[in-house]
Amino acid sequence: MCAAIAEEILDGGAAAPDHEIAIIGTGFAGLGMAVRLKQQGRDDFVIFEREPEIGGTWYLNHYPGCACDVPSHLYSFSFEPNPDWTRLFAPQPEIRAYLERCVDKYGLRDHIRLDSEVSEARFDEDTGLWHLRAGGRSVTARSVVAGLGPLTRPAYPDIPGIERFRGETFHSQQWDHDCDLAGKRVAVIGTGASAIQFVPQIAPDVQRLHLFQRTPPWIMPKPDHPIGRRMRKRFRRRPGRQRFLRRFIYWFLEARVLGFVVSPRLMKLMEHQARRHLRRQVPDPVLREKLTPDYTLGCKRVLISEDYYPTLSRENVDLETEGVREITETGLVTGDGREIEVDVMIFGTGFQATEPVPRGMIFGRGGRDIVDAWADGVEAYKGTTVSGYPNFYLMTGPNTGLGHSSMVFMIESQIEYVLGALRTLRRRDLKFLDVRPEAQREYNEWLQARLAGTIWNTGGCRSWYLDANGKNVTLWPGFTWQFRLMTRRFDAARYERAPLTAGRAMPVATNAG
Ligand code: NAP
């Protein structure tokens, strides 16, 4: 007791937190952050995970055919190359196993608290500490790194009667493997990145598959192939080869930014390739017509598949394009009034991507809910910090998403930025760092101006990249190396800095910590 008081006096009255850093989530973001902290010799962190196992999105999504649509030699940590990927696009179980190996190799297991949902995090300006409710317990932390994942909260369509259906029903992210689809009549709603992976897997088993398409996606060939044992051995023996492949994939994908951002007209080349893919795989002109998009390629996420189009030509698959008027106890009524009875209804309807944090979870200065701070649309400074939410870092935050390359690259950029902030906090003995409102405003004005001419804003489609007001709050409008350059050094001058020992914020300085 006396020692605690003495410590507090020496500390200038500052309370010591239970943990210096609380990380939320064990996906690529949370684990990547933890590994880099360990590599810097820091042990003063805890990782809270809502689920009973680690992996984030790669734990949650386990639908049939679930795989990454970015080549795995790039979609992995730069500090942890994996020579053992068995395919160019690794399936979900391999990616999950990779993350498990990272946990063990870097000694993260003891830091992880499973089944510990962070239901609330509240900032106390007096102490500069965050008070968290995690797994029903109260803990404090000086800094919070939120690796919540941009695509974890399922979105359901607002179709009248959705609650009335009496058969079995689930979302692609909550796949019910106990539900035997063999011989059943199944409706799938949605034709996005998830659906085009699981539809070919379930179609051969079901009696009849009614696939409800609202907007046809652009689909390119998927250059997937197994990576043989000999090649994997070579990667292991000569890591330089694997590094070369990673760089090659990186720059190949990066070239697409020219079409997305610089000149959307360049997308015509890719459209040509996608149309040829469709012609080759769908001989029926009526079906082909239904599958041909009427917006510029790239406006929505470009999908890749070799087995989706052929599946739609199966005798037991119906592509429904008239929409769903309502859902009944026994099935659906289509837009043109047809009643379709089904046993199972699967929602491949995506996620609440434009609302990255649920209401009632994060409270900053003055007890303000972060959702209220975003009344005019979700935004952050460099996709990572939000004014009024000191020492709080959002991984895969607003406008850090990609339509063309690996999110792990963006995550690693953010990690280095956050490490810089944490170093600044420590070295300068600060209570907190809070990004200045004008820094956030200027950054977002610049960002939105850049987004205005991109294909996502002008390509003639409706996508989850844009919020209800048509503001693009999800995507990074540029090359990923530009984001890397922007985040490589923590720019303390753009932050209000409150010292631990005094009640006043420090004046603006120009050097990063
Ligand atoms: P999504 O891409 O958002 O697709 C949702 C689908 O549901 C769309 O076809 C959408 O139609 C349809 N939909 C939504 N509301 C509807 C309604 N009321 N009525 C009819 N249809 C409706 O979701 P997702 O397929 O789950 O993929 C989400 C994201 O996860 C992807 O974009 C990608 O970033 C990520 N993902 C990645 C991988 C990977 O391999 N790395 C795999 C799967 C998913 P509209 O197009 O008309 O809106």
Image (tube, grey):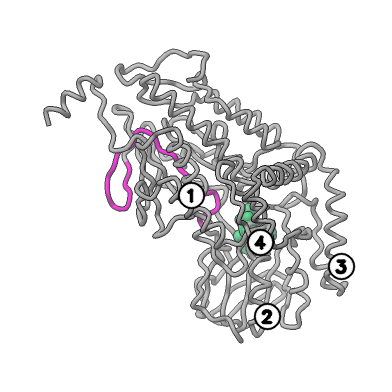
Give the number of the disc on residue 229. 4
Q: In front of the other: label 1 or label 3? A: 1
Residue wearing tag 3 = 280
Q: If the image is split into quadrants, where does the N terminus sit?
A: top left
Residue 151 % position (x, y):
55, 53
Name the N-terminal-most of marks 2 and 4: 2
Going from N to C along the chain, the mark reached first, 4 or 3, is: 4
Q: CA distance from mark 4 to mark 1?
A: 22 Å
Q: Nearer the viewer, mark 1 or mark 2?
A: 1
Specify the amino acid type for callout 4: Arg
- Dot 2: within a 10 Å radius of its alpha carbon, few (fewer than 14), some, or many (20 or more) residues? some
Q: Position of residue 71 (x, y in %)?
A: 68, 53
Question: From this viewpoint, is residue 267 visible?
Answer: yes
Q: Which of the marked residues, 1 or 3, is nearer the chain's N terminus?
A: 1
Amino acid on which disc 3 is placed: Arg
Q: Considering only vertical position in the picture, is 56 above or below 33? A: below
Which one is earlier in the sequence, the residue at label 1 or at label 2? 1
Residues shaded magenta? 132-153
Q: Amino acid at mark 1?
A: Cys
Q: What type is the residue that disc 2 sits on? A: Pro
Q: Circle 1 is placed at which residue position?
A: 102
Report which quarter residue 363 is drawn in: top left
Q: Residue 204: which disc?
A: 2
Question: CA separation, marks 4 and 3?
Answer: 32 Å
Q: CA distance from mark 2 to mark 4?
A: 30 Å
